[in-house]
Amino acid sequence: MNPSSLPLHLHVPEPSGRPGHGTDFSYLRVAPAGSARMPPIDVVAADTADLARSLVRVLDDEGHAIGPWAPKVETALLQRGLRAMIRTRAFDAKMLIAQRQKKISFYMQCLGEEAIAIAHALALAPGDMCFPTYRQQGLLLARDDIDMAELICQLMSNSRDPMKGRQLPVMYSYKRAGFFSISGNLATQFIQAVGWGMASAIKGDTKIASGWIGDGATAEADFHTALTFAHVYRAPVILNVVNNQWAISTFQAIAGGEATTFAAQGVGNGIVSLRVDGNDFLAVLAASRWAAERARRNLGATLIEWLTYRAGAHSTSDDPSRYRPADDAKRFPLGDPIARLKQHLVGIGAWSEVQHDEARKESEAEVNTALKQAESFGGALLDGHTPPIESMFEDVYKDMPPHLQEQLQQARAFAAAAAHTPGQGA
Ligand SMILES: Cc1ncc(C[n+]2csc(CCOP(=O)(O)OP(=O)(O)O)c2C)c(N)n1
Ligand SMILES: [Mg+2]
């Protein structure tokens, strides 16, 4: 039959592994450590096309830091980064248990992705603003000015919840830490980050923005709108695409990562782009510093695709054994970020098994203490705490406008009536 008269059909990408048969990870196109070149800081987008298809890596299989991207970094900073990753993992593990114990309603881990947010946080300057998703708790836990108990109060929606119960658990907001309120509407982070960066430039300020998105969310129109503005105005922004292979149960190829890379989509939009090993703490630090310097020197936006693997479930409401092989995380070719940085530091004589064990125990003790402290303030699931009705109306305007005052009166009257109706009261 003439091929042009065959019935049409569509291509629907499929992951190479499913429960019961292992993933063929050759689709990742992993390049050897040290093989990607470092371009000049004022490189133009088209000259990063090769880097957007390759992979910037520093740590080799033996834990040596090699190649042009190996950053000049003090050992103390790497030890701090390793401790922060251990701390983040301990926090996540305990919060997962707390959710199963019905102390919190919902949780999202960043298991396996800790290096990305933590090394990135160490590359930014005070006053820079991140627009994170729910999987960048490492941006907060990399710092020493965020009280862990306060984070748990947010998860518990208790009387000390800084969000006053208005946000889902994990949707933190810390202005003082450059951590913009998390929006549940995915991909809004990118347009907001580009807009914030543009505003910083319009004001003649020196602060830069860093926006975050997952592989799946790049399929949203906001991703493409953000890239256009970032390109045209050379906005001082870092555009982080965390490709952890999955968007809940949808494989990254469905969002457009099969025939091209997410980094290459940046190049196609006129933006300098890199594809980087996200489980390699040193590569994340080096690429983040490079992108931050470009933004600060008015050289424009940098898009970075961080290649990683979501080792845990999407959230506490998800069961990944239904759609992917159980041993995927262990077989992922880029390994585990904590094990890799540990191997490097042990290799240079700056870490030991004993120190590692101690750091783990200290972190677990810190989380346990923080959890107890947060529990002492109650919680939505622990004691039925609900924030006062006024909190629905406050904090939007400096002075509450008349129409909201009126609605507040109505809400108060409704609540009072409900409290007196049998079966409706609190
Ligand atoms: C605009 C929008 N669409 C859909 C959702 C529902 N949703 C929440 S998380 C998620 C998957 C996102 O996957 P990805 O962007 O890869 O990030 P990851 O969870 O892997 O970090 C979806 C579809 C949402 N929150 N917002
Ligand atoms: Mg994803």
Image (tube, grey):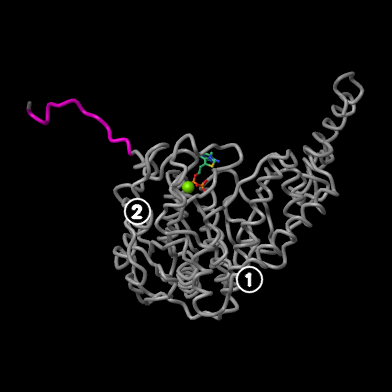
Is 177 within the magenta?
Answer: no
Q: Nearer the viewer, residue 100 or 267?
A: 100
Q: 18 above or below 399?
A: above
In terms of secondary structure, where does tag 2 sit?
Answer: helix
The part of the image, by quadrant, that contains residue 352 is bottom right
Whether the residue under disc 1 has CB within 8 Å of ligand 1: no
Q: Residue 25's spot in the image, x, y percent?
A: 35, 50
Going by the numbered disc 1, the residue's amino acid type is Val
Q: Residue 355's spot in the image, x, y percent?
A: 63, 71
Q: Which residue is mark 2?
A: 28
Q: Residue 289's spot in the image, x, y percent?
A: 49, 72
Q: Residue 235's spot in the image, x, y percent?
A: 47, 64
Q: Is residue 397 in view?
A: no
Image-based side of 403 in relation to 128, left or right: right
Q: 238 above or below 75?
A: above
Q: Main secondary structure of the magenta part?
A: loop
The part of the image, by quadrant, that contains residue 264 is bottom left
Please tell me how crowded label 2 is: few (under 14), some (14-19), or many (20+) other residues with Cα within 10 Å. some
Q: Nearer the viewer, residue 234 or 7?
A: 7
Q: 235 above or below 25?
A: below
Image-based side of 407 in relation to 57, left or right: right
Magenta residues span 2-13
Please tell me how crowded label 1 is: few (under 14), some (14-19), or many (20+) other residues with Cα within 10 Å. few
Q: Which residue is mark 1?
A: 354
Q: Nearer the viewer, residue 388 or 377?
A: 377
- Residue at 58 percent across and 68 percent down: it is 82
- Residue at 80 percent across and 43 percent down: it is 379
